[in-house]
Image: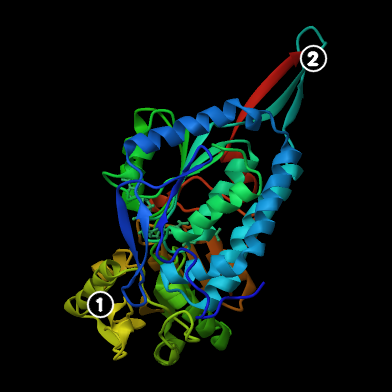
Amino acid sequence: MRPPTAADPYPFAGTQLPCLVGGEFIRTRNAFQNLSPVDGTTLCTVSEADATLVDRAVQAARAALQGPWGRTSLPERCALLRKVAERIEARFTEFVSAEVADTGKTLKEASALDIPRGAANFRAYADLALARSAECFEMATPDGRGALNYAVHKPVGVVAVVAPWNLPFLLLTWKVAPALVCGNAVVAKPSEETPATAALLAQVMQESGIPPGVFNLLHGFGTGSTGEALVSHPDVDAIAFTGESATGAAIMRSAADSVKALSFELGGKNAALVFADADFEAAVNGTVRSVFANCGQVCLCSERVYVERPIFERFVAALAARAQALKVGGPFEGADMGPLISRAHREKVLSYYRLAREEHGEVVCGGGVPHFGDRRDQGAFIEPTVVRGLAESARCVKEEIFGPVCHVAPFDAEEQAVQLANDTHYGLAAAVWTQNLPRAHRVARQMQTGITWVNDWFLRDLRTAFGGVKHSGIGREGGAHSLAFFSETQNICVKL
Ligand code: NAD
Ligand code: 6OH
């Protein structure tokens, strides 16, 4: 699998990306521009699906469920998913080119994480679905003959998958793969910011023999556009959504009238707790990663770093030094950190950089925009930033920023660290750095989050539960949890 070079073209240069509906690639009259976050140039145009096309896609999905797809066996679906994984790998260079162009993320991130994880998602769910067992309970009855209860798993039906722009391919396939292996038909809507890897996936689905209508792809915006039309469509049975908490709330309202099943992976304001007994270098390295990975645009990123007082000053100095040493640049420049997704998002993150000063924080490093003196100045680059000295009630400590920035604050006692970490409406992930084993378990268990890492960050086993508490989500995905969400379980009770 060869990573692309700057000489490899954007796979869709100069074209209009189509939607895929019922096995047919459709270019719509309404098209929008897909801009590069690296230099603001137009990468391609994208067909926006209107409510009529959304309806066609949902009907195509419904028809597919009633056709041969509805009669496929689990091994047949698993074989198809494995083919999809193989085709992604066969077109690895194109996928990476598409992802780095749309997002500006580093070549290393896209080659080592986003695209391999896309393929891995299809393989993992094929393996997991084949290994799934169904529950069975023998029961006693008054006549002594007994009864046997056994469960069967059926598809939910038409599933809408709505994905964000930060890990576009990873997060789309994370839901599409389990939905398909469970026998559903999917209507997917990637973010308007990052349509290209989804467009390649639509081609791969066709190449792999996924029947028409089983995977439909709609491009477009959210509110008042494709996304809203899809999630409020009465014939959609379930919605798997990843994105902002406020968007989740809007989708919940849209979905209420037709009582759709919902799985939500939402925002975070994640804490890292660094105890004085931590392996200092490992904690600094891990925190640099957990704050600045993907330009801080990972839902799991740490935006609040609490450090035990004896090592606080040394830790802040090391973190700031490492942040300042990060090379910011485009995907093909050997950079450590790419741009934010868009100028609009940069405006939002910069507004928090300004707010941090207004809220009497001290900007330890960064806080602005880098100047390159070339076309990258038209992009969405921003400086990695460390802030200290804010009150815990400050908006910068409470609200998700989703950029390469953290607030770092000292703590004096374990109970205080736990209280600070949990003092938020969010509850997605936490990172705990300590070499004291009993403390590691004790603190980890007290984190009000769906996911807690001890002495690492974003270490993923696809069989594990993934999701958030409080405003960070509804339900769990990953492993058996995804298979449960994308299936209807029927109990059959047989009197013996
Ligand atoms: P977003 O909520 O703005 O958009 C996500 C998707 O929803 C896009 O495809 C968008 O077009 C669509 N959408 C927007 N409004 C809609 C509506 N009213 N109806 C239907 N669809 C609508 O999120 P984003 O800015 O793309 O992504 C960043 C956010 O996602 C951050 O808050 C981040 O924390 C969160 N996120 C969470 C996880 C997780 O696993 N918990 C993972 C990644 C990102
Ligand atoms: C959020 O930005 C990252 C989510 C990661 C996953 O869903 C995953 O499966 O690793």
Q: Is residue 438 left or right of residue 221?
A: right
Q: Is residue 79 left or right of residue 45?
A: right
Residue that mark 2 sits on: 146
Question: Residue 468's spot in the image, x, y percent?
Answer: 47, 53
Residue visible at 51% across and 80% down in the picture: 7
Picture layout, residue 489 above or below residue 221: above
- Residue 379 in which image quadrant: bottom left
Amino acid identity at mark 2: Gly
Question: Residue 409's spot in the image, x, y percent?
Answer: 36, 79
Q: Nearer the viewer, residue 357 or 103?
A: 103
Q: Is residue 293 visible?
A: yes
Q: Quarter holding the C terminus?
A: top right
Question: Residue 99's spot in the image, x, y percent?
Answer: 49, 67
Q: Quarter holding the N terminus?
A: bottom right
Whole-number angstrom distance, CA of label 1 to CA of label 2: 68 Å
Q: Nearer the viewer, residue 433 or 24?
A: 24
Name which of mark 1 and mark 2 comes first in the sequence: 2
Residue visible at 34% across and 48% down in the picture: 48
Q: Is residue 442 left or right of residue 307?
A: right
Residue that mark 1 sits on: 353
- Secondary structure of the residue carrying tag 1 is helix
Picture layout, residue 137 above or below residue 182: above
- Residue 257 in which image quadrant: top left
Amino acid identity at mark 1: Tyr
Mark in front: 1 vs 2: 1
Residue visible at 54% across and 63% down in the picture: 452
- Secondary structure of the residue carrying tag 2 is loop
Residue visible at 61% across and 76% down in the picture: 436
Q: Which mark is residue 240?
A: none
